[in-house]
């Protein structure tokens, strides 16, 4: 009588590998669905209410000391007020919880790589700028920033960032692309 090989371990291994493959593909699909379409910062700011609290991918010009500025406009009008077409930027630190649904998009290495490029370029310059595409969570509404005027109309009192000059804040989750750094000469 000839011995037949036991195929049970082989079947179990195939099942486990198949399950791992399905989980991996599902994760890729979910991650791909979370990746928002890249849009110009000016467009996103013009529709700030629509994007408030949402994950966005924006392209713009990163200027040291000034945040990310729009490429196609200098100003945007939000609620009847003219604002610079720029956002203040902040980052998720290891000590805070990221916004719900954004955990898988955080890429600290891409943010650190951008920081290293900026620091290297600043060695011989007052300021630098570069074109970037970043993914983040836009925050344009904060009830503490509004007041009601004498006519009963709701108005924005102050913005985000240093001196409240930005109409929104972008919590940067990852940096998708960075152009070459351009040095900005100091004003004399």
Image (tube, rainbow, N blue to C red):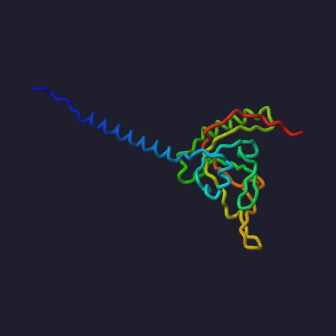
- 27 relative position to 40: left or right: left
Q: Position of residue 137 (x, y in %)?
A: 61, 51
Identity of the residue furthest to the bottom in this view: 151
Along the viewing direction, whichever of 33 and 8 lies nearer the viewer = 33
Q: Position of residue 165 (x, y in %)?
A: 76, 54
- 33 relative position to 107: left or right: left
Along the viewing direction, whichever of 45 and 99 lies nearer the viewer = 45
Q: Position of residue 106 (x, y in %)?
A: 57, 44
Identity of the residue furthest to the top in this view: 2
Identity of the residue furthest to the right in this view: 188
- 47 relative position to 7: left or right: right
Quadrant housing the N terminus: top left
Q: Position of residue 123 (x, y in %)?
A: 77, 33
Q: Residue at x 65, y 55 (%)?
A: 47
- 112 relative position to 30: left or right: right
Q: Residue at x 61, y 57 (%)?
A: 50
Q: Residue at x 73, y 73 (%)?
A: 152
Quadrant housing the C terminus: top right
Residue 174: image quadrant is: top right
Residue 64: image quadrant is: top right
Q: Residue at x 66, y 60 (%)?
A: 141
């Amino acid at each position: 009588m000839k011995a037949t090989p036991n195929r049970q371990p082989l079947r179990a291994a195939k099942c486990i590998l198949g399950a791992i493959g399905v989980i991996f593909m599902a994760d890729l699909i979910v991650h791909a669905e979370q990746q928002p379409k890249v849009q110009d910062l000016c467009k996103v700011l013009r529709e700030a209410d629509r994007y408030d609290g949402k994950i966005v991918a924006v392209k713009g010009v990163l200027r040291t000391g000034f945040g990310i500025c729009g490429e196609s406009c200098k100003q945007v009008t939000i609620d009847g007020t003219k604002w610079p077409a720029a956002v203040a930027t902040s980052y998720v630190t290891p000590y805070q919880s990221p916004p719900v649904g954004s955990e898988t998009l955080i890429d600290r290495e891409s943010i650190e790589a951008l920081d290293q490029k900026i620091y290297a370029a600043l060695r011989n310059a007052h300021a630098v700028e570069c074109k970037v595409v970043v993914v983040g969570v836009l925050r344009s509404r904060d009830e503490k920033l509004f007041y009601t005027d004498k006519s009963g109309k709701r108005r924005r009192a102050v913005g985000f960032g240093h001196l409240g000059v930005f109409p929104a804040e972008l919590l940067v989750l990852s940096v998708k692309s960075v152009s070459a750094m351009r040095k900005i000469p100091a004003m004399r």
